[in-house]
Amino acid sequence: MSRYISKQTSILIPTLREAPAEAEARSHQLLLRAGFIRQLAAGIYSYLPLGWRVLRRIESIVREEMEDAGFQELLLPAMQPAELWERSGRYGDYGAELIRLQDRHEREFVLGPTHEEVITALAAAEVNTYRKLPLRLYQIQTKFRDERRPRFGLLRGREFLMKDAYSFDRSWEDLDRTYQAARDAYRRIFTRCGLKFSMVEAEAGSIGGEGETHEFMAPAEIGEDTIVSCPACGYAANLEKAAAAAAAGERSEEEAEHQAPAIQKVATPNTRTIEEVSAFLRIPASSILKTMIYMADGEPVAAIVRGDHEVNENKLTAALGCGALELAEPQDVLKITGTPHGYAGPVGLHIPVYLDRDAVLYGGAVAGAGEAHAHVRNVVPFRDFQPAQIGDYRSVQEGDRCPNCAEALQFAKGIEVGHIFKLGTKYSSVLDAGYTDEAGREQTMIMGCYGIGISRLLSAVAEQSLGDQGMCWPLGIAPHAVHLIPVSTQDPDQAAVVDQIATELARQGVECLIDDREERPGVKFKDADLIGLPLRIVVGKRAGEGIVEWTDRRGGVRTELTWQEAVRLAAGICSTAGETL
Ligand code: ATP
Ligand code: MG
């Protein structure tokens, strides 16, 4: 049978009437019900024929665009010696997400969650002159991460498909060009996959690096990330990274020294939280200092933000330059500060204090007194305590002012489908990826890395493409373009027309799925709405006259046409689908 024609009786599409109860995300429910995927263990899935067809289409779009951007495909091992990860320092840093195992000789290995180490070691061994640079490589491969909470089906798996690309350049300027090429390729990839997305400034996380980094976000309710954006100037950032304009109206240091009265202790029985203090003293949360005690690589530090703000641990980690940052346990707070949980404050505190710039309240603020059931009023920085550093350590809030144009910032939920990084020399310096330049001097390669979650992307598209009328896959990645549905498999006229349509579509290179099952029409249509092919041709009562029902499900248009006209429409739509860019 022609590879363009698939018959439902002979392809494994185990559709389900009900979604399993554990599937929370709409895309997860759909992919299970439509028979695209099955779970083997938490966060570990089989891709069934239809799911795999979508993945392969996504992959081929990714391959085309990465090759056009000058990246060459290779395939690196999933199983990697732990020693390599020790050299980069990530064997410890990556933590519990890293899957570790031993071979029969008790040598330690890991299953790659990402491949900076392997590719950098490869470049270090195989490339040593400027003549071989720039070098741009990519692979599409299964990754392993023992996620704390695998969920939402393919959105957060423990075994998942990723496209990861790596670049090696001679200078930061050359890296800028590579980064731009990757960024443009990403835009084309997501557009061709039919995804709505935006590119946002991001935090580097455990991949690290010295330069800028951007994420590609697909807006969706289920998204675990928060996209902060400015409707006026286009500023967009992940909440982990987003900045707001500093609060206005601060007073100068000298002015504060003269004007604020001396600090004064007040009894505040049973007021551990900001809300309780605010209610008890009848003051707004914004005039209270929230003192949070953290352990940064095992050393205690205090972070202070305004009572109505939250500490942003990513910003604090970046400011501290530490690996692991954790909120101190109440018993540790007591040990470190001598203060019971809820009453810590900056006055008399003997650990470094990181003061958020919006919490520099020279007019005097209320803070924990450093003893149970008491607070202090009129606390002024520099006069009453010495901050180690003042900076932006808080998360922005909806309505805060844009850092560029002062418009009110907006929040939306998003799914991170891609992430690109300017790594600089983070890996090349420790793994000795150097080269000799034109003048014969030894140099270190400047690296970038670029990831797309292929299997997550499939789910993100499903999340966005699921409407009231069921699923509708974007044409560029649909498992098949046309669903060809005979209402009755017993009717010879219908069978003949279906045959002619399928043959003609195949001749024109259009893939179709024929529902040749002996099922009631209701069952067929229900399954078709789940499977979600974008074009549908129903062959029914009027088959004898050569008339069929045509639906372009992307716009919901349904009409009766001759079968030849339907084929012409389908072929026309499919031939222009690849030319949208
Ligand atoms: P997240 O913040 O969602 O955990 P990450 O920052 O750990 O993602 P990267 O290390 O940048 O992700 O990985 C590159 C891409 O791989 C991500 O942009 C995402 O699309 C995908 N990805 C990451 N973790 C998973 C996962 N557990 N399941 C599926 N895809 C994933
Ligand atoms: Mg992660």
Image: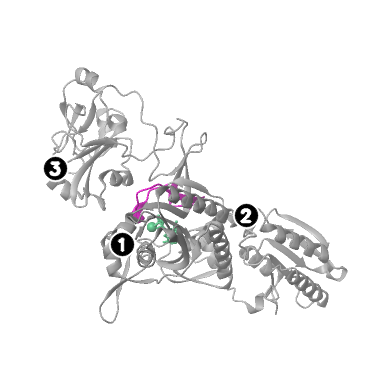
Helix, strand or loop for disc 1: loop
Asked if the stretch drawn in magenta spans residue 418, the answer is no
The reply to whether the magenta stretch includes residue 216 is: yes
Does ligand 1 reach within 8 Å of label 2's beta carbon? no
Residue 292 appears in view: yes
Query: What residue is pinned by disc 2?
Result: 468
- Ligand 1 image position (quadrant): bottom left
Residue 527, percent from left and from top: 64, 67
The residue lying toward the viewer, choosing from 113 and 369, is: 113
Quadrant in which the N terminus appears: bottom right
Quote the CA–CA distance across marks 2 and 3. Answer: 57 Å
Q: In this rendered view, identify the residue nearer to me: 379 or 389.
A: 389
In this rendering, the answer to whether 366 lies above or below 81 is above
Are the residues tagged 2 and 3 within 8 Å (C-beta)?
Answer: no
**Residue 220 visible to an observer of this rendering:** no
Q: Position of residue 87 (x, y in %)?
A: 27, 63
Q: Nearer the viewer, residue 226 or 331?
A: 226
Mark 1 to mark 3 CA distance (whole Å): 41 Å
Label 3's element? helix
Magenta part of the chain: 202-226
Q: Residue pushed farthest bottom?
A: 104
- In the rendered image, residue 103, in percent from the top left (x then y), is placed at 30, 79
- Kind of residue sitting beneath label 1: Leu
**Nearer to us: label 1 or label 3:** 1
Residue position marked by numbered label 1 in the rendering: 431
In the rendered structure, which amino acid carries the disc numbered 2?
Asp
Q: Residue at x 26, y 39 (%)?
A: 273
SS at circle 2:
loop
| Mark seen at residue 337 | 3
